[in-house]
């Protein structure tokens, strides 16, 4: 019996960047159950349908209306899925919604799917309403939207045990039906050799040397603790560089520059972004250590990649990160001098100690976060769902 699954909320596939996009790419690419038919909403300039990874991809064109664009995109994707289900008389469909953006309309949309004999699953992502970039009214919208979507979902798939615990504690009155399926990663080495011209050119352009830099990858936003990481790195005694791989955020950049004067420290290097997956793997592999400052969210893709490719990992001490890193990483907080001391200590670690952390990190990914096992769990979830 075929099971049709409609995935909305990602920008679509083929994946070029982004956690949800990478997830959908791997979910469709590593499919094991051929009776599951995926339909993937893709942010596009037209409404054409195309096939990728044997998935039916349908374009959704939305006007550029600022921050509300993502909300409109999800709502339109949902409505397009409903129309396709009706037009093609699809039995027992599942709509899987990634993140909580369309709360005000969600209850009505779910009712329409229920009338068609289907179900709606939700991945709540992290605490979007806690992100510092949003104004108070926008945060209130995100919180309300999360509440409405948790309330009306048939199943909530959490990629973090801490998120699952939060859902039950915060929305206990709804008696939410939840399950835990982590995000995936791998430990396949980069295809690039140590002397590959692409890698060597990038290193030369950024004035970096193998094993002589700490690395951080993530959006340049306050909740990723860039202020603490930069401040503490500047206070450390290390001779290594700090390569910050992030998007452009001029306002936040200028604010930190005025406050920390990091432009006076040649060790602090903003290296832009890298979308070449093999080059990014190589950059991670050749870093001395990775510093992870994310404080909001569930299982962060960047953290899994760090554990899979970088030998030594220094993680911000919050439940989400400890859940993933366990004893395969070292931890820090925002206390003055704490991370600086940890960095100085890492510089003195023996080769054996670093190899031990690296071994534990790779094992962590193999044991609980391999894409093959994650996809298998999703397929069981989709195919063995409870019927109405």
Image (tube, helix red, strand yellow):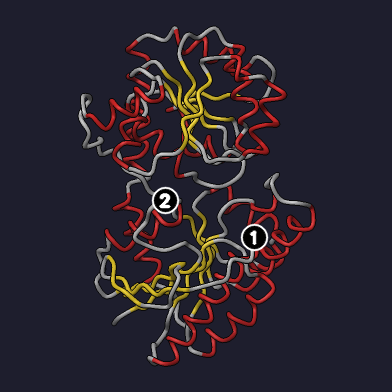
Horizontal and vertical percent position of residue 388:
49, 84
Ranked by sequence position, the earlier of labels 1 and 2 is 2
Q: Quick check: 253 above or below 312?
A: below
Residue at point 42% right, 50% down? 17
Image x and y of residue 72, in percent: 60, 71
The residue shown at (47%, 38%) is: 324
> 170 left or right of 206?
right
In the picture, the disc for residue 67 is 1
274 relative to 124 in the view: left or right: left
Could you say where residue 296 lies in the image, as x and y percent from the top left?
61, 43
Look at mark 2 in the image and give the residue it sits on.
17
Q: Nearer the viewer, residue 282 or 32?
A: 282
Nearest to the observer: residue 27 or residue 287: 287
Q: How crowded is mark 1: few (under 14 residues within 10 Å), some or many (20 or more)?
A: few
Q: Of the numbered discs in the image, which one, if any, rests on residue 303? A: none
Splitting the image into 4 quarters, where does residue 25 fall?
bottom left
Q: Are marks 1 and 2 in contact (CB under 8 Å)?
A: no
The secondary structure type at the circle numbered 1 is helix
**Element class at badge 2:** loop
Q: Is residue 141 left or right of residue 70?
A: right
Which quadrant is home to the N terminus?
Answer: bottom left
**Looking at the rendering, which quadrant does residue 387 occupy?**
bottom left
Choose top left, top right, bottom left or bottom right for residue 38: bottom left
Task: Compute the Cα span from label 1 to label 2.
Answer: 19 Å
| Label 2 CA crowd tier, 10 Å (few <14, some 14–19, many 20+) | some
Q: Nearer the viewer, residue 172 or 332?
A: 332
Q: Residue 66's x, y, as percent?
A: 64, 61
At a point 43% along the width and 86% down the height, the residue shown is 84
Q: How many marks?
A: 2
């Amino acid at each position: 019996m075929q099971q049709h699954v409609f995935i909305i909320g990602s920008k679509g596939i083929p994946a070029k960047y982004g956690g949800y996009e990478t997830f959908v790419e791997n979910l469709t690419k590593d499919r094991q159950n051929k009776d599951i038919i995926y339909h993937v909403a893709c942010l596009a300039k037209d409404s054409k349908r195309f096939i990728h990874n044997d998935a039916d991809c349908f374009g959704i064109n939305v006007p550029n209306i600022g921050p509300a664009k993502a909300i409109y995109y999800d709502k339109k994707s949902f409505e397009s899925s409903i129309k396709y289900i009706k037009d093609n008389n699809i039995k027992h469909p599942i709509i899987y919604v990634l993140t909580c953006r369309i709360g005000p309309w969600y209850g009505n949309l779910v009712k329409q799917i229920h009338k068609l004999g289907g179900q709606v699953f939700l991945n709540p992502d992290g605490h979007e309403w806690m992100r510092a970039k949003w104004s108070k009214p926008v945060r209130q919208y995100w919180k309300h939207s999360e509440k409405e979507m948790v309330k009306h979902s048939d199943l909530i798939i959490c990629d973090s045990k801490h998120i699952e615990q939060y859902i039950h504690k915060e929305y206990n009155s709804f008696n939410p039906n939840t399950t835990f399926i982590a995000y995936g990663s791998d430990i396949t080495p980069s295809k690039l050799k140590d002397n590959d011209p692409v890698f060597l050119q990038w290193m030369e352009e950024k004035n970096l040397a193998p094993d002589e830099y700490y690395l951080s990858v993530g959006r340049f936003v306050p909740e990723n603790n860039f202020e603490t990481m930069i401040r503490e790195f500047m206070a450390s005694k290390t001779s290594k560089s700090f390569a910050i791989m992030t998007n452009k955020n001029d306002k936040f950049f200028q604010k930190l520059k005025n406050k920390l004067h990091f432009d006076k420290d040649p060790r602090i290097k903003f290296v832009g972004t890298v979308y070449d997956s093999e080059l990014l793997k190589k950059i991670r592999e050749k870093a001395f250590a990775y510093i992870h400052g994310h404080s909001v969210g569930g299982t962060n893709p960047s953290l899994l990649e760090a554990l899979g490719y970088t030998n030594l990992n220094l993680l911000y001490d919050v439940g989400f990160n400890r859940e993933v890193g366990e004893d395969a990483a070292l931890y820090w907080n925002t206390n003055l001098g704490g991370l600086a001391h940890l960095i100085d200590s890492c510089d003195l670690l023996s080769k054996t100690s670093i190899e031990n952390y690296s071994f534990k990190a790779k094992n962590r990914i193999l044991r609980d976060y391999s894409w093959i096992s994650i996809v298998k769990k999703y397929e069981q979830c989709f195919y063995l769902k409870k019927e109405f």
